[in-house]
Amino acid sequence: MTFAVWMYYRLSTYTSKPLAYTGLIAFYISMEYLHQTWDLAFPWMTLGNGFAGMHQIVQWYEVTGVYGGSLWILLSNILAFEAYQKIKNQKQYKLAGIWALLLILPIGYSLYRYKNYEEKSVPVNVVTVQPNIDPYEKFGSISANEQLNILTHLSDSVGQTNTEYFIWPETAIPNYADEERIRTNPDFLRTQQFLSKYKNGTLITGIESVRFYNDKKTLSAKVNPNGGYYDNYNAAMQVENSASVAFYHKSKLVPGVEKMPFPKIFSFLAPVFSKLGGTVSGWGWQEEPGVFYAYSGIGVAPVICYEAIWGDWVAGSVKQGAQFIAIITNDGWWGNTSGKDQHLLYAKLRSIETRRYVVRSANTGISGFINQRGDVVQQSKWWTRTALKADINLNDNITFYVKHGDVVAIVSSILALLAAGFIILKKWFLK
């Protein structure tokens, strides 16, 4: 953030105030975009996320995404500052009027869009489960079998004969399951036994999975003490009343915790990490967003925890055919802090950007349903074991944002590069 402001200062010494302000906006938004795209990614702090608690006034995120919000904040603050200077020094109010319009017009359009937006009635009955198992106990103190008992009991407590989807949280099945042998895995067989009661039922659950290779096929692969290599994944799995099973591997991994940043650069450390039983890249991942397709033809975007703050990643799944979004997470690591609340709020922005229902299943945190306008229509309480059900509406329409992505951020990045080049050339010619 400091670097973006420093670049603005450097630009302001060589050019006019309007161009310098344009550079400030470009530098700042490109800085935010960098924090979405590089290996130290942390887009949690993007300015546009700040409207998650007042989603009614940013319905236009279906066009711009959160970077449109960042642009709005930066531009309105710059105009407010300049308008204040004009009024204070010259008693001129024209700029203040422009600033007022910049606030009023987007809000007015958004409220109109919010009030008049109508969902197509394509109902699907969905159950989301919050087992509320302490994350510091779920990987040791409580057996996987006991956790499955809790999950199936909660699901059955609200499941109906017409329920089409059950959503279980991140790492709901904590045992490392071999994906190639999943159909003989005892935990998998338990899930199919549970689903047998629901003729049209599909289960999406978090699972810790593993794949084995003879050769090092991926950057993240670790050396197997028994020979060959393997990857372990924080994954989502789709189970149906058939032999069909699908996996999605969490791709936006938490830097340092789930993935070492810049693994290619630090690949020379691989021998050291392998001797310690680890790897330079942590968990395995996949390169593209995924979609789960059920036998019924319904497409679902599987989103695991941290990935929910990547608008373009979620939009990628929707672009491939997802008709609703399933966010599975485990927010208990943060305790009873604002982190769990912000994580829920950010999901509202994903629903607006894509105009898709969001179903959220948190092991500990807040589970619930968010409609296509970004309204939380039902939610659980913090640290409560429960299951919720709702009829959600599917949507096939593609928004401008889903189709075109983060145009605001990309244009800002181009302008920032041009401005940086201009600064370098000016400095060089002035020597």
Image: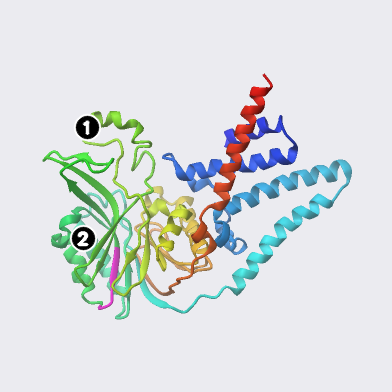
* Quadrant housing the C terminus: top right
The magenta segment is 199-204
SS for dot 2: helix
Q: Residue at x 67, y 42 (%)?
A: 22
SS for dot 1: loop
Task: Reply above or below: 422 against 49.
Answer: above
* Quadrant housing the N terminus: top right
- Residue kind at label 1, given as amino acid type: Leu
Q: How is the image coloured?
A: rainbow
Name the mark on residue 126.
Answer: none
Q: Residue at x 65, y 52 (%)?
A: 72
Alpha carbon distance from label 1 to label 2:
32 Å
Location of residue 418 (image quadrant): top right
Residue lying furthest left: 226
- Residue 201 within the magenta-colored segment of the rendering: yes
Q: Position of residue 25 (x, y in %)?
A: 64, 43
Q: Is residue 34 toward the left or the right of residue 162 in the image?
A: right
Residue holding disc 2 = 146
- Residue kind at label 2, given as amino acid type: Glu
Task: Reply above or below: 49 against 202.
Answer: above
Residue holding disc 1 = 276
Q: Position of residue 358 (x, y in %)?
A: 44, 65
Q: Position of residue 191 (x, y in %)?
A: 21, 66
Location of residue 424 (image quadrant): top right
Q: Are marks 1 and 2 in contact (CB under 8 Å)?
A: no
Q: Nearer the viewer, mark 1 or mark 2?
A: 1
